Amino acid sequence: MADAAVEFLLGNLKQLLVYNVHLISSVKDQVDSLCNDLRLLAAFVKETTESRSKHAVVKELVRRIRIEVYKAEDIVDMYVFYKSVQKTRTNFGFAVHLPDYSMKLRGVGKEIQDIRGRVKEIYDNKLFASEVFNKTETFIRSPPSVEEENVVGFDKEAENVVGWLKAETKELEVLSVVGMGGLGKTTLVKKVYNDSVVQYEFFIRSWVYVSQVYSTREVFLKILFDVTRETKDMSQWSVEMIADELRDRLKDGKYLIVLDDIWTKKAWDDLKTVFPNTKNGCRILITSRNKDVAVHANTTLPPYQLRFLTDDESWELLEKKVFPKGTRCSRELENLGKQIARKCYGLPLAIVVIAGILKKRDKTPSSWEKVEQKVNTYVAMEPEQCMEVLALSYNHLPYDLKACFLYFGVFPEDYEIPVWKLIHIWVAEGFIQRIGDASAEEMAEENLQDLVDRNLVLVERRKANGGIKTCRVHDMLHDMCVKQAEEENFFKEIKGLEQSIYKSIDPNVFRRVSVHSRVLDYISLKPDSSHIRSFLCYGQEETVLRPELITYFPGTFKLLRVLDVLPISFTRFPSIQLVHLRYIALLGTFEVLPAAITNLWNLQTLILETSSRRIEVKADLWKLLQLRHVYTSAASVLPAPSSSSRKGGQDPLVNENLRTMSKVSPSSCTDVILARTPNLQKLGVRGNLASLLEEKKGICKFDNIAKLSHLEKLKLLNDTYPISPMDGKLRVLPDWYKFPPKLKKLTLSDTMLDWEQMSVIGKLLSLEVLKLGDNAFVGERWVTPDGGFVQLRVLQIGKTDLVRWEATGHQFPQLQRVSLKHCEQLVAVPSGLGDITTLEVMELSWTSQLAIASARLIQKKFKLLVFPPDQET
């Protein structure tokens, strides 16, 4: 996508100019000139986003812009790569020949100057320019056809909406039905609109299709005709006159107005002025793909989120659509039909499309088997019926959100994406535009929430505090992402392809490669990867990389920014000289993080999964000033900052960007180390915690953690290997005032503390989430003290020998969720928990039947979840 490519290069050049003047001094003038030219081109590609498909000249010009931008990006990045290598090797006495990149940049500059001339011609050609940049259409798109027969799965939903319409409130109310495209919003509302009870209740009714492109005048005229059934000539009337007439006709009656398919807040603001509040129970029903529009229309009544069909409902709809009324599917086709329906993943639009295909085919198992094997392919063969409907949501996205959304296609279908991973990669890719004081991660979270609110991204699991933990996109949208990304040269998906296709992948075209299977086949071919910026691997099985390929991979990716290859296991740490690398995720048997990592001066996120229990960090992480997140599965033994890690040899070098360190060894929690991470927000400590938590000779390393004034999440994992667990039992916790002041989430595991120590945790004033992992506390009885846990919202207790827990409701005034796992000896859940008015959910997993029975006795408003589903005794 050219708009994103230009923005990314501008950001890249800006970073080079700010942080690496010493590296680009000889080509600084060319880089400055390039920046100025690109700003004009960036404005051009943004303004022509909606007109490219209709103007071949503009489409070709945008294609040329993308090609030249990629060339410029390659030249600048390669120049910086070789300058960095030259600087490193010169320090060791090696000479490095550097090509004349100044001449190369001048060549690209000439090409871009030519493109600028073409762009200027368009701007100067006023008539053509008005066609290119005019984003307003005069027509209203035809409304979708809705078949009112064979409606499946909406009975309960329709009953709920009808109940809302009949509610006793006399005030004018707005209800919105929201969901992704093709989910059946219009079908549901049409079912409600034609309900006999609704027709009796609302004598004045109107249904109007709004869509992305609408005319306020035409919408008002349609409602006015529905209300009056008059056909008077209003061609000379202004919009204001029509609006006045409509308000006058509505002011005395009880009306129901349906505004189908509203896309923007502005559309609602344009239309709402004609609906008077007659205080006699009038209602407005809205359908929208965008939750923000719904909330804007009514801030007090939550929108009705339409669900996907179940597998049984999907098959029922498919059968009704394929077979004539009064007939049923044969038994030999039923299982195949159910599998086909299941692969539509509950999306009614996809089911209807695939039903149309099956209807035309022979009713034989062999014919249906072909469809079952490639459901998505067959759906894509009918673009006007399905894919174009889904693409409307993508086309409506702001340009910066388009890149974020397309990136979902690099993950496999049905892949449950950890949000922290997604956000870190977005930031590394350069997709996130920072605004004001907000961090890149905060802006990325807003982008994700925006995509969720637009019903393009599905939330799979939520965090304890309600935030999004994992997400995915519907398979039909995933298919659309892959096709759109390949069309725009955004990335290439490799999934079970032949070697000839592997070799045909042109890295000059595709800057990102995502391998879903046969990753060793791809790497063994040693394809040209000199232009690849992101290499991602999401194979299902772990693959051990052969020793002879470790040298090649990832050494051939000179310009790589993102390397996510956790399914590939490295037998030794690869030699890496990737100065552009921002995100790296590796798996292996590492025991040492080599010093060479210090040369990755652009690195933002470092993820290491290793089978070792500890890893010695020899890299001078304090020199990596862009580093934001460090995740290691093993306990990291960090080095003290070297004398070279100082500014001017005097002041300690502070990394103000570092936000996450997980997991570090207790021995590394020293003042000299933690003082260099003043803005740390997440910290995990793994090892023998006795030396960290228990004061000896007047010294307690935990005091250093307490100085982290921005720390919000702390995880303490007591790993006492090789000594026995009981020898690693902790006696006490530090006093409550020694904990970080802003601590919101605390996780403890294998600490084996006595339950009396919970009184310390209860005094943490900012604590909202408390996770007690296996054996965090031991003892048969816990008496919860009064006056604590004032902000606690989530309490999780893992494996424990707890038998009796005594607590009252007022001891957890804000508690919303309780989770007990493997509390097999617990005889009862405290009856006082039933009195907590804020409690929403109680989860009991692998607990005793007695505990489950006691929970049912106190269950009032909260939801009780039991796993595995207990049997009646």
Image (cartoon, helix red, strand yellow):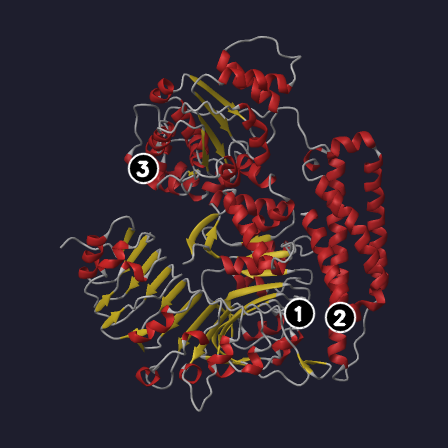
Q: Quadrant of residue 200?
A: top left
Q: Quadrant of residue 638?
A: bottom right
- Please name whichever residue, 789 or 100, is drawn nearer the observer in this view of the structure: 789
The answer to whether residue 375 is above or below residue 546 is above
Q: Which percent across, then down, holds residue 5?
A: 69, 52
The residue sitting at 65% across, 17% down in the picture is: 238
For marks 1 and 3 on the same chain, the one whose residue lies earlier in the sequence: 3
Label 1 neighbourhood size at 10 Å, few (<14), some (14-19), many (20+)? Answer: many
Q: How far separated are the C-alphas under marks 1 and 3? A: 55 Å
Question: Callout 2, which amino acid?
Answer: Tyr
Q: Secondary structure at mark 1?
A: loop
Q: Secondary structure at mark 3?
A: helix
Is residue 837 shown left or right of residue 715?
Answer: left
Question: Callout 1, which amino acid?
Answer: Leu
Is residue 328 shown left or right of residue 643?
Answer: left
Q: How far separated are the C-alphas under marks 2 and 1? A: 10 Å
In this view, which residue lies farthest toward the bottom? 697
The answer to whether residue 310 is above or below residue 856 is above
Residue wearing tag 2? 82
The residue sitting at 80% across, 67% down in the picture is: 24
Q: How many marks?
A: 3
Residue wearing tag 1? 578
Residue wearing tag 3? 334
Q: Which percent across, then down, holds residue 615?
A: 50, 80
Q: Secondary structure at mark 2?
A: helix
